[in-house]
Image (tube, rainbow, N blue to C red):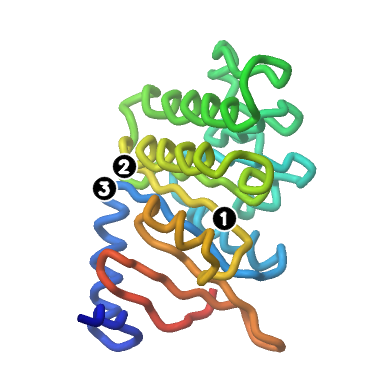
Amino acid sequence: MASPKPRFRGEDAVRDLDAVLRTMKREGCHLLVTGEVDARVADRATRRLFGDPNYDRKRVLAAPDSSTHVDRYLPVDVSPTDPAVWVVDPTGRERSIPPSAEDRTLPDADGDGSDLDRLRQELVQAVTFYADAGDGLAPAELQVGVASADALLERDDRHAVEQFLRTLGALVRGVDGMGHVRVALPDDHPTVASLSPLFDARIELRRRDGLVPEQRWHVPDRDVTTAWTQL
């Protein structure tokens, strides 16, 4: 028996996606961002996923490739040194943490374990810090983003990367936060297919010649793929 075709466009798909987004914001979610686009488009998507700078958000940015400038991933007027921003970097070169978290024991770049282990340890520290501060976290108040998982997929064991992403998803959902991970691969790439079950939805990016960047959402559990819309 043939599997049902995913639904595109139309009011039903829009209503389904709206309902999914409301649930994600209320209960937490983990999103995979795909598509072969230039860095400017990918960075724009990451900034948008980190939320409106005018709202009270706690932002945790993981930058596995510390050769890049982390401020390119944050919304306008949000600085890596803001007290509500924690930049996670297993090498320690781009790390930036809130002043009130300076007593935390963070992974040492020269310590035991792999970069992936240290990345996981510091992400746990960052999320726990914000969850324990004040009155805790409201739904969608915590935004966690891995700017690019490409280096992890290239240099680390695939099973280890998948376990890291599974742990990250559980961590973010556990505090009703919203997380996203970027991979610079086509949405129909076999690697995306293997990673997709670890996420609640995928956001596919594209930019056609002479046109504005676009996105569409895939929600496998709801069998929904939206139409392309402006990013």
Please state if 18 lies on the left or on the right of 186 as rendered.
left
Q: Position of residue 28 (x, y in %)?
A: 32, 47
How many other residues sit within 10 Å of disc 1, few (<14), some (14-19) or many (≥20)?
A: many
User: Along the polypeptide, which appears first: circle 3 or circle 2?
Assistant: 3
For badge 2, the amino acid type reads Asp
Q: Residue at x 54, y 64 (%)?
A: 34
In the picture of the structure, the residue carrying the numbered disc 3 is: 27
For badge 3, the amino acid type reads Glu
Separation of marks 3 and 2 at Cα, in angstroms: 5 Å
| Contact (Cβ within 8 Å) of mark 3 with mark 2 | yes
Residue 176's disc is: 2
Provide the secondary structure element on which disc 2 rests.
Answer: loop
Q: Position of residue 161 (x, y in %)?
A: 53, 41
Residue 222 versus residue 93 in the image, above or below: below
Residue 219 versus residue 160 in the image, above or below: below
Please state if 131 lies on the left or on the right of 84 as rendered.
left
Q: Residue at x 38, y 79 (%)?
A: 226
Residue farthest toward the front in the current orientation of the protein: 1
Q: Answer with the quarter of the image where residue 56 lies.
A: top left
How many other residues sit within 10 Å of disc 2, few (<14), some (14-19) or many (≥20)?
A: many
Residue farthest toward the right in the current orientation of the protein: 67
Q: Position of residue 122 (x, y in %)?
A: 55, 26
Q: Residue at x 65, y 51 (%)?
A: 150
Q: Position of residue 224 (x, y in %)?
A: 31, 75
Q: Answer with the quarter of the image where residue 127 lies.
A: top left
In the picture of the structure, the residue carrying the numbered disc 1 is: 182
User: Along the polypeptide, which appears first: circle 1 or circle 3?
Assistant: 3
Quadrant including the N terminus: bottom left
State the residue in front, 25 or 209: 209
Q: Residue at x 50, y 61 (%)?
A: 192
| Contact (Cβ within 8 Å) of mark 2 with mark 1 | no
